[in-house]
Image (cartoon, helix red, strand yellow):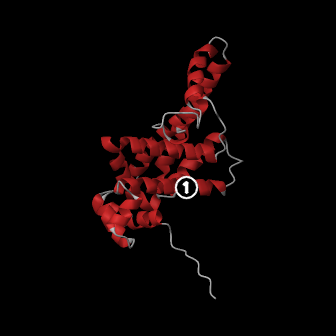
Amino acid sequence: MTETTDHTPDSMARLVEAALMHVPFDGWSEASFKAAAGDAGMTVAEARAICPRGAVDLALAFHAQGDAAMVAKLAETDLTALRYSDRVAFAIRTRLDLVEHDKEAVRRGVTLFALPMHAADGARALWQTADAIWTALGDTSDDLNWYTKRATLSGVYSSTVLYWLGDQSMDHAATWAFLERRIDDVMRFERAKKAMRENKLLKPLMAGPEWLAARVKAPGKGAPADLPGRWRG
């Protein structure tokens, strides 16, 4: 008796892979979704059962795949010799390098999530990328820092993506220089925040925001359901 093993990729992965052949021409659209379903050997109804919102869900799945690939790459890379700021820069660069061959799909995703009706999905995806980076780098903060790190990194990542999409420099050298400047800005902010905490006169100003963050951001303790990522209980 011969044992057989099913090596077929999961249905969502098949749909995303098929969609990437059409998105550069038709965007993350209904046309791309239907074409992907056909190319993946599914009926539109079967594909809709996997992606109820069609191309929007496919675009989000594509983004999530990029996050997962980045986390896997970081897990196999020794970053101990790098400063923490350089680790963050390396993670963002890795995230973008991994989708270099699908740059037009990223561009089309930016366009899709710029639409008001999908802006919340886009913001949630950015937050999840920032959370994936900090978690992969071993962040253990559980106070106001947890929120500020992810909020700040979401801004750094999104601005870097926009710069990267328009960058024509050799090996995206201009993008990496831009990223370094943005991270330097963040580090200056972090140093200023640390100084406030250590200053006896200014420290009371941080007490209110930190108390509020601790009350709101307690995973699994009734946090509002519409908050992104780890905030959801």
On the picture, is 88 further left or further right than 24? Answer: right
Residue 82 horizontal/vertical position (percent) = 68, 46
Q: Image quadrant for the C terminus? A: top right
104 in relation to 181, above or below? below
- Rendered residue at 37%/64% (across/down): 47
Asked whether residue 169 appears in the rendered view, the answer is no
Q: Which residue is mark 1?
A: 68
On the picture, is 161 further left or further right than 203? Answer: left
| Closer to us: 179 or 75 | 75
User: What amino acid is found at the position of numbered circle 1 in the picture?
Assistant: Ala
- Rendered residue at 65%/40% (across/down): 139
How many numbered discs?
1
- Rendered residue at 65%/35% (across/down): 141
| Closer to us: 217 or 197 | 217
| Closer to us: 3 or 61 | 3
Asked whether residue 93 appears in the rendered view, the answer is yes
Which quadrant of the view contains residue 197?
top right
Residue 200 horizontal/vertical position (percent) = 67, 13
143 in relation to 167, above or below? above
Residue found farthest to the bottom: 1
215 in relation to 172, above or below? above
Q: Residues within 10 Å of mark 1 (few under 14, many from 20)?
A: some
Residue 165 horizontal/vertical position (percent) = 40, 51
- Rendered residue at 36%/53% (across/down): 56
122 in relation to 37, above or below? above
Mark 1 falls on what kind of element?
helix
Residue 100 horizontal/vertical position (percent) = 46, 59
Q: Image quadrant for the N terminus? A: bottom right
